[in-house]
Image (tube, rainbow, N blue to C red):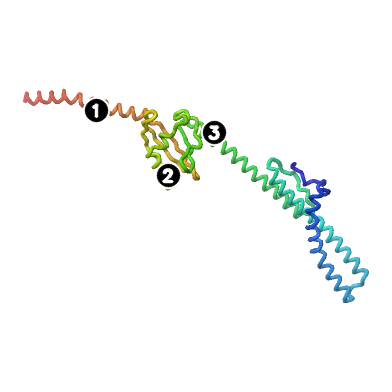
Amino acid sequence: MADAGLTTKTLNDKALFDKAWPAALAFFLALGALPTIIFGLLVSFHELALLPGLISWGICLTVALGFGVLLGRDMAVMAQLVRSLRMSPDELPKTTNLAVPGMRLLGQEAINLVRAERLNQARASDRSAADHALLERLPDPLLRLNASGAVIWRNASAIATFGMETAALLRHPDLRAALTEATNTGSPVRQSIALTVPVPRNLDATVIPVGGLAYVLIADRTRERNVEKMRADFVANSSHELRTPLASLIGFIETLR
């Protein structure tokens, strides 16, 4: 379909002829009107003999007719070229087959423009696929929410961590507040969240607004917080256990004094 409507065969196509002749007639009338008026005036005022005037007028009309036909045909082919570029997204014609140099250049520029646009689209598609693959392989859970706060996509880590049940996370007031703040400010917002169901978890959520959507990156800090709590409890217990013997020893020393 790449060259459909653009080869010599299309000159005999009835649809193309039906589109070309009105333009050809308009160009012929526009190009032939001025010579007709000039030769008519010259002959009327006897500035030019009738026979040479008719011959010159005929030559001008023939040239005007030929140029009008070529230009009208090129306009029809150009319209079909633009339609082909729009309707056939997978292929591009190699040549424009336009006769008038200016129209040929215009057609070639149209092809080059569409080719560059499709190249940019292909590159953007490749970048989008690479970005999606990167997000899918993140070790931390990542959720994409629409404007109403519903999950429209989650990466593999989010599925492994939460399964399909993210209602408790999304209903958490701290996360809702972070979503509202991120939407209003347009800047990322980080918020600590303590979940009790389905299992106790301590999470750090980073909400990133992007074009009407919101990405929620989750970092599970449960193990780290548990280790910190165990360390704090150990220090508190050790201090308490050491405080009693030290108090007795200090009292004994005071007694000896």
Residue at the image position 88 percent from the left and 66 percent from the top: 57
Question: Closest to the observer: 84 or 59?
Answer: 84
Residue at the image position 20 percent from the left and 24 percent from the top: 241
For label 3, the residue is 133
Q: Residues within 10 Å of mark 2 (few under 14, many from 20)?
A: many
Instruction: Pinpoint residue 243: horizontal percent, then vertical percent.
Output: 18, 26
Please state which of the two labelled residues, at mark 3 or mark 2, is closer to the viewer. 2
Q: Residues within 10 Å of mark 3 (few under 14, many from 20)?
A: few
Q: Amino acid at mark 1?
A: Ala
Q: Are marks 2 and 1 in contact (CB under 8 Å)?
A: no
Q: Amino acid at mark 2?
A: Ala
Please state which of the two labelled residues, at mark 2 or mark 1, is closer to the viewer. 2
Q: Quadrant of residue 3?
A: top right
Which of the two labelled residues, at mark 3 and mark 2, occupies the earlier sequence position?
A: 3
For label 1, the residue is 236
Q: Quadrant of residue 192?
A: top left
For label 2, the residue is 182
Q: Is residue 229 left or right of residue 138?
A: left
In the displayed structure, 251 sits above or below 212; it is above
Q: Quadrant of the C terminus?
A: top left
Q: Residues within 10 Å of mark 1 (few under 14, many from 20)?
A: few
Q: Quadrant of the N terminus?
A: top right
C-alpha span from label 3 to label 1: 47 Å
